Image (spheres, helix red, strand yellow):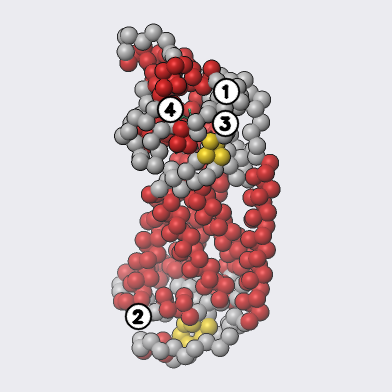
């Protein structure tokens, strides 16, 4: 690993450039940029359509974080958490300097930079873990599907969304810090994260990353990625529905609501439910004109999400665990009615639909 000579023109950096960020760390950083961008796009913009993709990006993120955790102990000098300048007095001193418009270059992380990394990595870890829990609880998918109930998943959805917003703020803070350091204080941080080199400040270079560090990084990452895919694949194979619960369709609630919405209400009808299930009412998303777009033409058969994931049959006779959790039923009505009709379903539509499914 012989670093190419630096060609940028900032006076501070041409002298004494030394390799500071090891290659695995830089690859981690830029992979994280790609992964988090994908997670944000699939999470914020195309939530319903790309939920599966979002989950897989989450697995990738979790693997990257696991790698970073290990690398924080066995990586080269400046990659190790132990060398992070997390001293409070230093951080406050740096902050004061920063606000006065000065910032000294440092060979590794600056105190504020180090804290920023702790915050970012902490948020990312909390996000991927809460995502894993909610993926298991709400969608009954992934390695935690057997351990997390629907309600717990729903609670974590809230947390997941709040954390995601915090992360967006933290990323803006990180980018602002980098922009100020780069363009106002002339410390070429972005270039350093690409080439790995920084100008040397005071003292001797602490054990520059070697070829062995790069090789070690590749091995650590391969082990992490293998363990992760093994965990996901074996857990998924075990996650088949276990229909042991008796159907308990929350019809009485919907009947009370339907009566409130219209005095002419005189009970639900499986026939109307059938018509509703097969109808193409318009008003929703063009990709999902009908309930059958995902659930298929036969309620007794397995359906398919837009992302290609199997949906267990809706007919109670085939999947007795269906409609046993009112919160789950309501959530999917909310989501799916919005996709197909572009509005919430009425209590009458919901009751008719459930009555039809009960008759199947
Ligand atoms: C974009 C695909 C899609 C469309 C369109 C769709 N659904 Fe679903 N639906 C799903 C998925 C995914 C699930 C949850 C997976 C599971 O429970 O196995 C689900 C679950 C449900 C549930 C919850 C079942 C339970 O076990 O509690 C109900 C109720 C439901 N859908 C009703 C409807 C109705 C009514 C329509 C039409 C207005 C509709 N769906 C259209 C994808 C879709």
The percent position of residue 215, horizontal first and vertical second, equals: 65, 76
Q: In the image, which is nearer the foreground, mark 2 or mark 1?
A: 1
Q: In the rendered image, which residue does mark 1 sit on?
A: 316
Mark 3: which secondary structure?
Answer: loop
Q: In the image, which is nearer the foreground, mark 1 or mark 3?
A: 3
Screen quadrant of the N terminus: bottom right
Screen quadrant of the C terminus: top right
Residue 189 showing in the rendered view:
yes
Q: In the rendered image, which residue does mark 4 sit on?
A: 278
Task: Give the alpha-carbon distance from disc 1 to disc 3, as whole Å.
Answer: 11 Å
Q: In the image, which is nearer the foreground, mark 4 or mark 1?
A: 4
Q: Residues within 10 Å of mark 1 (few under 14, many from 20)?
A: many
Task: Give the alpha-carbon distance from disc 3 to disc 4, as whole Å.
Answer: 15 Å
Residue lying farthest front?
297
Mark 1 Cβ and ligand 1 under 8 Å apart: no
Residue at point 35% right, 41% down? 286
Q: Quadrant of residue 23?
A: bottom right
Task: Give the alpha-carbon distance from disc 4 to disc 1, as whole Å.
Answer: 17 Å
Q: Which comes before the other along the chain, label 4 or label 2?
A: 2
Vertical placement of 300 versus 141: above or below?
Answer: above
């Amino acid at each position: 690993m012989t670093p190419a000579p630096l060609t940028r023109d900032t006076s501070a950096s041409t002298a004494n450039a030394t390799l500071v960020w090891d290659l695995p760390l830089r690859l981690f950083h830029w992979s994280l940029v790609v992964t988090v961008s994908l997670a944000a796009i699939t999470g914020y913009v195309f939530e319903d359509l790309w939920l599966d993709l979002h989950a897989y990006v989450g697995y990738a993120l979790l693997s990257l974080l696991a790698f970073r955790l290990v690398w924080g102990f066995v990586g080269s000098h400046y990659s190790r958490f132990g060398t992070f300048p997390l001293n409070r007095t230093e951080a406050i001193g740096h902050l004061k300097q920063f606000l006065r418009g000065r910032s000294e270059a440092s060979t590794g992380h600056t105190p504020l930079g180090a804290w920023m990394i702790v915050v970012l990595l902490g948020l990312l870890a909390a996000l991927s873990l809460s995502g894993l829990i909610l993926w298991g609880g709400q969608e009954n998918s992934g390695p935690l599907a057997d351990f997390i109930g629907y309600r717990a998943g729903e609670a974590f959805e809230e947390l997941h969304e709040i954390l995601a917003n915090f992360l967006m703020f933290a990323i803006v803070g990180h980018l602002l810090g980098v922009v100020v350091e780069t363009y106002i204080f002339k410390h070429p941080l972005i270039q350093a994260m690409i080439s790995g080199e920084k100008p040397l400040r005071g003292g001797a270079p602490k054990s520059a990353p070697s070829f062995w560090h790069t090789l070690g990084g590749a091995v650590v990452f391969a082990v992490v990625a293998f363990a992760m895919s093994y965990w996901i694949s074996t857990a998924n194979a075990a996650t088949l529905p276990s229909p042991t619960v008796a159907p308990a369709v929350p019809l009485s609630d919907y009947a009370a609501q339907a009566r409130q919405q219209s005095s002419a209400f005189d009970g639900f009808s499986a026939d109307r439910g059938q018509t509703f299930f097969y109808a193409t009412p318009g008003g929703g998303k063009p990709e999902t004109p009908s309930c059958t777009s995902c659930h298929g033409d036969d309620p007794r058969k397995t359906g398919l999400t837009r992302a290609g994931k199997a949906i267990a049959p809706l007919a109670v006779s085939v999947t007795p665990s269906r409609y046993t959790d009112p919160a789950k039923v309501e959530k999917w009505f909310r989501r799916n009615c919005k996709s197909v009709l572009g509005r919430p379903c009425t209590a009458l539509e919901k009751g008719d639909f459930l009555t039809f499914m009960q008759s199947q």
